[in-house]
Image: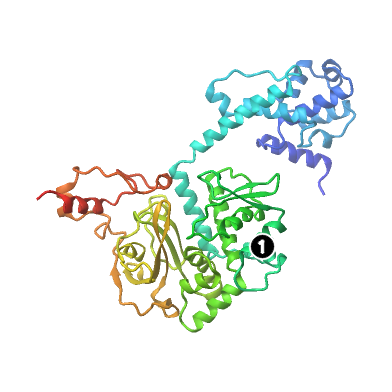
């Protein structure tokens, strides 16, 4: 155990390193609180420690960091211990408010705005100080929001995908949470019913309320104070009505707090989606079904979807969680907008996704020969689309389907290396394509005859949803397939 002096020295080392919990302001306010509670004046304390009153005042205002020897002298003069002086918590609610305002004034927001410093004194009410602090915090929040640049978004996506790859997209702690809540409501196996989902919400202390005025940009709103989850009355027939409920309380199960960065926001979204899928497709049942299907060599996303009454995307996403960790199958997954823009992507099978200079995949454009793009040209939207694609990294088999959303159509694809296609239904397909990407001659550069005719003569407007453009790499027309534009112009040009 550390001695008192060792503890104090460690604390002061943290202070010197700008530890946010222990700083000169906190120590100064504690000295002032102890002094005034003992009815000592500045002059009296100054005389007791052989310092000028002005020096004591500067310490109490957090403008001077006291040495360890001086803190010992102050502790003796105030008839307290050194440990009491270096506690990291504020001595009172008022002191905490004053410390927060002082910190704000010393921060970049006040400096950037060129605002004069306000002397925090007893004469100012708590309401005045709280107003100053609230305005500062809101300006700081807006600045941080603006700082969430496309570069930050792409870096965060890249870092998160690396973590997912390292764990084969399998998170045991989330699987354990799913099992715990399922057991709590008596789930004994098989699909999870709407009633069981409602029982989970009740078990967690939430009641469900369906309203017709939910904010347009939300799928649900949780009132944590009153234990209510608000959901829309106009549920889409193509959407699983259980998912919004589970996603709402999944955040509570994960103990998520308001994200402080884009990276934290992405991590929370991944955890919420993972836990939702783990609840709707319980690991034990899903693995049993997939293991049997592997033995029979007929793994199918459609069968997994139908067995648990979930969307194709949820089934495909859940398959990637379990494929490698539980079935020993390397895999890749893609969700691609009809414009060709990658919305989500994951791989641990060495398929080479397109990426930008930051290593980010989301927001880039997928090869026009990949299954995720060719599926949009298939006339039969009710049957699964299978395709082999020969790439520089090897041959991959992929299955894909199209799903609709308010932003347009998306393809959801799951693929594996050629050596593992033997476990899947659809392996006998004759559909085959060749992709040379990332070689620009494949599809990233318009054919010379079209480029010569139309370069500089077109001005397209991107169809890609506005919400996706922030994550797109920079370019003349982010989200626009130049070859597609030139082909359209060529076809419609007057002869």
Front-most of 437 and 423?
A: 423
The extreme bottom residue here reads 296
Near mark 1 (Cα within 10 A), the count class, few <14, some 14-19 or many ≥20, is: some
Horizontal and vertical percent position of residue 260: 58, 42
Q: Toward the viewer: 495 or 228?
A: 228
> Which residue lies under the disc numbered 1?
177
Q: Position of residue 248 (x, y in %)?
A: 61, 53
Name the residue at 46% across, 74% down: 300
Residue in front for this viewpoint, 285 or 452: 285
Vertical placement of residue 123 versus 294, above or below:
above
Asked which secondary structure carries label 1, the reply is helix
Q: Could you tell me residue 62's position as x and y percent?
A: 71, 25
Residue 173 can be seen, yes or no? no
| Residue 318 located left or right of residue 62 | left
For this orientation, the residue located farthest to the left is: 495
Q: Quadrant of residue 130?
A: top right
Q: Residue at x 66, y 62 (%)?
A: 177
Is residue 134 found left or right of 337 in the rendered image?
right
Q: Position of residue 380 (x, y in %)?
A: 33, 69
Which colour assignment does the render follow? rainbow
Q: Nearer the viewer, residue 84 or 410?
A: 410
| Residue at 55% over, 53% down | 269
């Amino acid at each position: 155990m550390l001695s008192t002096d060792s503890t104090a020295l460690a604390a002061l080392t943290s202070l010197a390193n700008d530890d946010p919990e222990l700083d000169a302001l906190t120590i100064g306010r504690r000295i002032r609180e102890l002094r005034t509670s003992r009815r000592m004046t500045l002059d009296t304390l100054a005389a007791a420690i052989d310092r000028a009153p002005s020096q004591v005042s500067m310490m109490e205002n957090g403008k001077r960091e006291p040495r360890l020897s001086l803190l010992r002298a102050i502790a003796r003069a105030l008839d307290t211990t050194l440990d009491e002086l270096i506690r990291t918590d504020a001595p009172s609610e008022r002191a905490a408010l004053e410390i927060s305002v002082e910190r704000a004034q010393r921060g970049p927001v006040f400096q950037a705005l060129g605002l004069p410093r306000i002397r925090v004194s007893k004469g100012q009410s708590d309401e005045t100080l709280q107003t100053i602090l609230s305005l500062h915090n809101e300006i700081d929040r807006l600045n941080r929001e603006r700082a969430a640049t496309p570069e930050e978004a792409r870096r965060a996506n890249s870092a998160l995908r690396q973590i997912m790859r390292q764990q084969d997209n399998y998170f045991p702690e989330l699987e354990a949470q799913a099992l715990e809540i399922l057991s709590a409501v008596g789930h004994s196996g098989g699909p999870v019913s709407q009633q069981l989902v409602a029982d989970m919400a009740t078990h967690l202390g939430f009641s469900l309320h369906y309203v017709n005025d939910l904010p347009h940009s939300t799928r649900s709103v949780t009132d944590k104070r009153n234990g209510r989850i608000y959901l829309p009355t106009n549920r889409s027939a193509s959407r699983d009505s259980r998912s919004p409920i589970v996603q709402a309380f999944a955040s509570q199960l994960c103990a998520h707090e308001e994200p402080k960065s884009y990276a934290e926001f992405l991590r929370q979204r991944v955890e919420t989606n993972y836990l939702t899928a783990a609840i709707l497709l319980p690991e034990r049942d899903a693995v049993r079904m997939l293991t049997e299907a592997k033995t029979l060599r007929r793994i199918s996303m459609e069968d997994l979807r139908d067995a648990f009454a979930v969307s194709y995307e949820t089934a495909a996403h859940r398959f990637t969680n379990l494929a490698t960790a539980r079935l020993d199958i390397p895999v890749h997954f893609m969700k691609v907008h009809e414009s060709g823009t990658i919305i989500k992507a994951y791989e641990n099978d060495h398929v080479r996704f397109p990426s930008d200079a930051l290593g980010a995949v989301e927001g880039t454009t997928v090869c026009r020969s990949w299954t995720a793009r060719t599926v949009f040209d298939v006339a039969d939207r009710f049957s699964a689309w299978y395709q082999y694609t020969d790439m520089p990294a090897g041959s991959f088999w992929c299955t894909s389907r199209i799903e609709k959303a308010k932003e347009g159509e998306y393809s959801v694809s799951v693929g594996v290396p050629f050596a593992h296609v033997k476990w899947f239904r659809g392996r006998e397909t004759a559909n085959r394509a060749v992709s040379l990407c990332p070689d620009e001659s494949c599809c990233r550069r318009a054919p010379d005859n079209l480029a010569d005719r139309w370069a500089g003569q077109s001005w397209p407007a991107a169809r890609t949803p506005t919400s996706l453009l922030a994550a797109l790499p920079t370019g003349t027309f982010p989200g626009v397939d130049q070859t597609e534009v030139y082909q359209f112009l060529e076809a419609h040009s007057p002869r």
